[in-house]
Image (cartoon, rainbow, N blue to C red):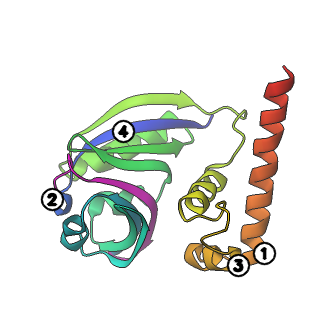
């Protein structure tokens, strides 16, 4: 039985120097490479936060919105990178993570690993996943990214090829993901309108 769990973890030391009431951060993707976790993040706020986080590949996506990559040796992110993450962000001095898990044993194992780091962790919500969702998590993430970068604007601010390069996938693979996602969204929309 698949379910998602929302967990709340005390903010890590490497993130404490930022004013999170003035800035916000969304974790978009985690990739574990031995002792380093490569993290794609979206930051809303000032450039001071970007400088403190040692971001690289900084791309301004809107007025005070930036996307960038951070390499960190965060033990928490190293653990989380082994799970399917639907969402990760900072709120009220806490890291909030929505994680897909296969059973409660896997959840207990995750909580134990985080506690072993000396971090306080709290489960705030558990939801059984239903197949009614129009999009897979990957489709949703890619659609959101495409919207943010102006792929659906007229005229487009980014081409399919450029978007594919940023996502590190082939243009044909991206086109297929977008087409399937768009079809699913339209089918759900039409089904809801007919009811």
Which one is in front, 171 or 23? 23
User: Which residue position holds label 1?
Assistant: 172
Q: Are marks 3 and 1 in contact (CB under 8 Å)?
A: yes
Question: Would you place residue 65 above or below residue 127 in this image?
Answer: below
Distance between mark 1 and mark 4 Cα atoms: 36 Å
The quarter holding residue 93 reads top left
Q: Where is the N terminus found, in terms of image quarters?
A: top right
Mark 1 burial class by Cα count in 10 Å: few <14, some 14-19, many 20+: few
Span highlighted in magenta in the image:
17-35
Q: Are marks 1 and 2 in contact (CB under 8 Å)?
A: no
Distance between mark 3 and mark 1 Cα atoms: 5 Å
Distance between mark 1 and mark 2 Cα atoms: 41 Å
Distance between mark 4 and mark 2 Cα atoms: 18 Å
User: Which residue position holds label 4?
Assistant: 7
Q: Secondary structure at mark 3?
A: loop
Residue shown at the point (72%, 40%) measured from the top left: 134
Residue shown at the point (78%, 35%) measured from the top left: 189
Nearest to viewer (mark 1 / mark 2): 1
Q: Where is the C terminus found, in terms of image quarters?
A: top right
Disc sitting over residue 153 in the figure? none
User: Which residue position holds label 3?
Assistant: 170
Instruction: Choose the circle earlier in sequence order: 3 or 2.
Output: 2
Question: Would you place residue 74 above or below residue 192 in this image?
Answer: below
Residue shown at the point (38%, 73%) measured from the top left: 69
């Amino acid at each position: 039985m698949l379910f998602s769990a929302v967990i709340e973890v005390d903010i890590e030391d490497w993130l404490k120097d930022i004013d999170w009431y003035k800035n916000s951060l969304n974790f978009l993707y985690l990739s574990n490479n031995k002792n380093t976790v490569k993290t794609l993040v979206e930051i809303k706020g000032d450039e001071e936060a970007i400088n403190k986080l040692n971001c690289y590949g900084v791309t301004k996506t809107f007025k005070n919105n930036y996307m960038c990559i951070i390499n960190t040796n965060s033990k928490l992110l190293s653990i989380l990178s082994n799970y399917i993450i639907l969402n990760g962000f900072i709120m009220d001095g806490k890291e909030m993570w929505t994680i897909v898990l296969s059973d409660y044993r896997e959840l207990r194992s995750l909580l134990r690993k985080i506690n072993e780091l000396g971090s306080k962790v709290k489960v705030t919500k558990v939801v059984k996943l239903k197949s009614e969702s129009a999009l897979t998590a990957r489709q949703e993430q890619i659609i959101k990214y495409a919207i943010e970068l102006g792929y659906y604007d007229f005229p487009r601010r980014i081409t399919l090829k450029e978007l594919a390069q940023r996502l590190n996938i082939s243009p044909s693979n991206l086109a297929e993901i977008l087409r399937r996602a768009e079809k699913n969204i339209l089918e759900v929309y039409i089904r809801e309108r007919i009811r």
